[in-house]
Image (cartoon, rainbow, N blue to C red):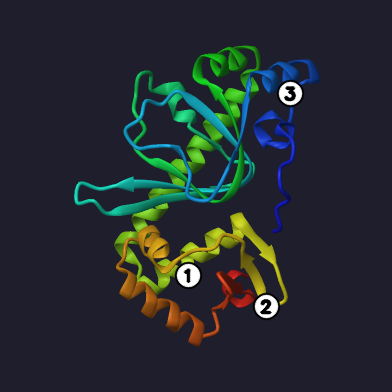
Amino acid sequence: MEKRKYLCLNDIPIFSRIDKTSFTSICHATKKRHMKKGEYLFKQGEPENGVYFIKEGSLKFVRITENGEEVIIQIVGSGEVIGETALFREGAFSPVSAIVLEEANVCSIDIKSFERIIIGNPEIALQIIKNLTARLYDTWEKITELNTLTIQEKVISFFIQLAQEQGEPCSEGTLIKIPLTQQEIASAVGASRVMVSQALQELIESNCICRKRKHYIVKRKCIY
């Protein structure tokens, strides 16, 4: 379950089968950026003009509603590709903001350059389609959960997903490496902070999770 950090762009799955010559041109086309917690990679309402590859760290996709509320749509980490929907939505604007949760190293390629890369490497296009399909499925699952689960079930389901994607084994179970506030958890599961606080306390009392400084640990019995 432990994920190693991606120190090279070639380690990101969509580039894993690219030959060395092609990969060299891809690498030269990217811009590298080190980002600190709280920085915006892009903002809601801005034109979509790039594809981004997370080498290290994690980001959250956030949407501001008409009422001014912040809703976390998704949390992504090392090895993820984001912004690829711009390939299929020319002239579109981003429906979400991408905000750094922990220090991150991100590579980016402008849309036109990436389109040329795809033409020469159709296997990349296939991998992107698979990524988008998986993301769409995750969205459907989240909608179902928001309509059918209790707050406690939503919280533990959110933690289990993070443990599987961003977890690190420890003696008690799986440590979620991303530090999360109660408000961020509430935003992610579509509930108030007060309700989430109560659900967290109940999960701690039932020995499903525990807290270690700023991080949560999901106990083994809740994952397996």
Looking at the image, do the residues carrying marks 1 and 3 touch, with CB atoms under 8 Å apart? no
Q: Secondary structure at mark 1?
A: helix
Question: Crowding at label 3, few (<14), some or many (≥20) Cα neighbours within 10 Å?
Answer: some
**Residue located beneath label 2 in the image:** 172
The residue under label 2 is which amino acid type?
Answer: Glu
Q: Quadrant of the N terminus?
A: bottom right
| Residue at (35% x, 71% y) in the render | 151
Instruction: Name the residue nearer the viewer: 37 or 77.
Output: 37
Residue 165 lies in quadrant: bottom right
Question: Which label number is shown at residue 156?
Answer: 1
The residue under label 1 is which amino acid type?
Answer: Ile
Q: Earlier in the sequence, mark 1 or mark 3?
A: 3
Question: Crowding at label 2, few (<14), some or many (≥20) Cα neighbours within 10 Å?
Answer: few
Image position of 101 (left or right of 106): left
Q: CA distance from mark 2 to mark 3?
A: 39 Å
Q: Secondary structure at mark 3?
A: loop
Question: Crowding at label 1, few (<14), some or many (≥20) Cα neighbours within 10 Å?
Answer: many
Image position of 102 (left or right of 136): right
**Residue located beneath label 3 in the image:** 18
Q: How many marks?
A: 3
Q: Where 91 falls versus 206 (above or below)? A: above
Q: Earlier in the sequence, mark 2 or mark 3?
A: 3
Q: CA distance from mark 1 to mark 2?
A: 16 Å
Q: Earlier in the sequence, mark 1 or mark 2?
A: 1
Residue 199 lies in quadrant: bottom left
